[in-house]
C-alpha cells in the first residue's frame, strides 16, 4: 500500500517550540477576592493589642435645659461612664510557610519561588481576615449586632422597602451596605421588577450599584445557608462612633499594617520556614452603627410575559 504521507518541507511547530522561551505567569490564585470591606473600614492602631471601648452609662440621664427669661433653677448633671467597659484583644490569623532551599535555589527564574510562596500565602491569610471580620464569634460583625438593630425581610427577597427600613436603623451617616453577591443580584432583580433600577457609582475603579446613594459592597464571606443570607449596613470611623478595624503597628518583620513575616531558620532537612501573622480585630463603637437585614432570600426570580404593541 502506498504511503500517502506528504514529506516535511520545513521545520514544524512542535520541534520549533523546543527552542522557544515560554512566557510564564505568576501562579494565579482563584480564591483571591477584592476584599472591599478591608479597604472601606477605618483602621485604628492599638497599643499592646488591647482596645478599651468606653461608653456613657445612661445617656438619657444627662440633663440640659433651654433657659427662659425668668430665673428658673438650672438643672445639675454629670456624665457617668460604664464601670466595666468592653476590651477587644487582637486575634492572629497565622501560619508557617515551609520552602525547601533546593527549590528556591534552582527554580527561581523568572519568578522568585520564595516571593511567590509568600505572596500566595499572604493572600490566603488576608482572605481569612475578611471572613473573621464578618463571622468571628467574638468580634465579627454578625456576632455584634444589637437585637434592636435586626429586621426581617417583608417577603423573603430583598426589596427597596427592606433596604429603606434598614437605613432607619443606621440613619446617622451610614457608609455602605455589605452583602453576598447573590444577595445584591436578588436586590437588583426586585428593583428591575419595580421599574426602579438602582444607580451605579465607581469606587476603586470598579462599579457598584447603590441604593439611596449608599453602595452595595459585595463579599462572598457573608454566609449563605439554605438559600438565605443577610445584608448589613455600616457606619464607619471613630469620629462617627461607627465600626472600626483594629491593628497592631510596629510589628517585627512588618510588611503592611498588622502583617508580619519572620524568618524562622533552616532545619536539618534544608527546609526554610517563615512565620506569617496578621493581627486584627473589629469594634462596633455604638449599637446604631450596625444594622442587619435577616432572612434574605436569594433564589427568587420573576417571569416577564412578552408584550407587543
Image (cartoon, grey):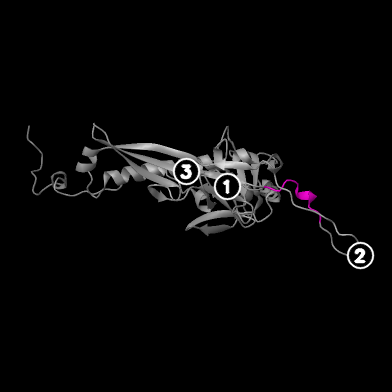
User: Disc 3 versus disc 2: distance between alpha carbons?
Assistant: 58 Å
Determine if residue 297 is in view. Answer: no
Q: Nearer the viewer, residue 239 or 157?
A: 239
Residue at the spot of label 2: 71
Q: Secondary structure at mark 2?
A: loop
Residue at position x 39%, y 37% in the image: 95
Find the magenta span and give its range: 55-63
Residue at the spot of label 1: 178
268 left or right of 225 in image: left
Residue at position x 89%, y 59% in the image: 73
Residue at position x 51%, y 48% in the image: 47
Q: Nearer the viewer, residue 24 or 15?
A: 24
Provide residue 207's location: percent of width, then percent of height: 51, 56
Q: Quadrant of residue 208?
A: bottom right
Mark 1 vs mark 2: which is more N-terminal?
A: 2
Residue at position x 52%, y 59% in the image: 202
Provide residue 200's location: percent of width, then percent of height: 56, 57
CB of mark 3 within 8 Å of CB of mark 2? no
Q: Quadrant of the N terminus?
A: top left
Mark 3 vs mark 2: which is more N-terminal?
A: 2
Residue at the spot of label 3: 279
Amino acid at each position: 500500500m502506498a504511503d500517502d504521507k506528504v514529506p516535511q518541507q520545513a521545520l514544524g511547530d512542535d520541534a520549533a517550540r523546543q527552542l522557544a522561551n515560554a512566557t510564564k505567569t505568576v501562579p494565579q490564585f482563584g480564591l483571591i477576592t477584592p476584599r472591599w470591606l478591608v479597604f472601606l473600614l477605618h483602621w485604628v492602631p492599638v497599643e499592646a493589642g488591647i482596645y478599651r471601648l468606653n461608653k456613657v452609662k445612661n445617656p438619657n440621664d444627662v440633663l440640659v435645659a433651654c433657659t427662659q427669661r425668668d430665673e428658673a433653677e438650672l438643672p445639675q448633671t454629670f456624665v457617668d461612664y460604664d464601670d466595666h467597659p468592653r476590651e477587644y484583644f487582637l486575634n492572629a490569623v497565622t501560619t508557617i510557610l515551609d520552602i525547601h532551599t533546593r527549590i528556591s535555589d534552582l527554580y527561581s527564574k523568572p519568578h522568585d519561588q520564595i516571593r511567590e510562596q509568600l505572596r500566595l500565602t499572604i493572600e490566603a491569610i488576608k482572605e481569612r481576615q475578611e471572613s473573621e471580620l464578618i463571622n468571628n464569634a467574638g468580634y465579627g460583625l454578625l456576632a455584634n449586632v444589637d437585637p434592636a438593630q435586626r429586621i426581617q425581610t417583608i417577603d423573603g427577597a430583598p426589596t427597596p422597602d427592606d433596604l429603606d427600613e434598614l437605613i432607619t436603623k443606621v440613619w446617622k451617616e451610614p457608609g455602605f451596605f455589605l452583602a453576598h453577591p447573590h444577595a445584591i443580584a436578588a436586590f437588583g432583580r426586585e428593583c428591575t421588577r419595580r421599574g426602579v433600577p438602582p444607580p451605579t457609582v465607581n469606587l476603586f475603579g470598579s462599579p457598584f450599584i447603590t441604593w439611596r446613594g449608599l453602595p452595595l459592597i459585595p463579599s462572598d464571606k457573608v454566609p449563605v445557608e439554605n438559600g438565605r443570607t443577610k445584608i448589613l449596613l455600616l457606619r464607619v470611623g471613630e469620629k462617627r462612633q461607627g465600626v472600626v478595624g483594629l491593628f497592631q503597628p510596629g510589628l517585627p518583620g512588618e510588611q503592611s499594617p498588622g502583617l508580619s513575616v519572620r524568618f524562622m531558620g533552616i532545619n536539618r532537612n534544608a527546609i526554610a520556614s517563615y512565620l506569617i501573622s496578621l493581627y486584627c480585630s473589629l469594634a462596633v463603637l455604638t449599637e446604631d452603627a450596625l444594622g442587619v437585614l435577616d432572612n434574605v432570600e436569594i433564589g427568587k426570580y420573576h417571569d416577564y410575559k412578552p408584550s407587543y404593541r
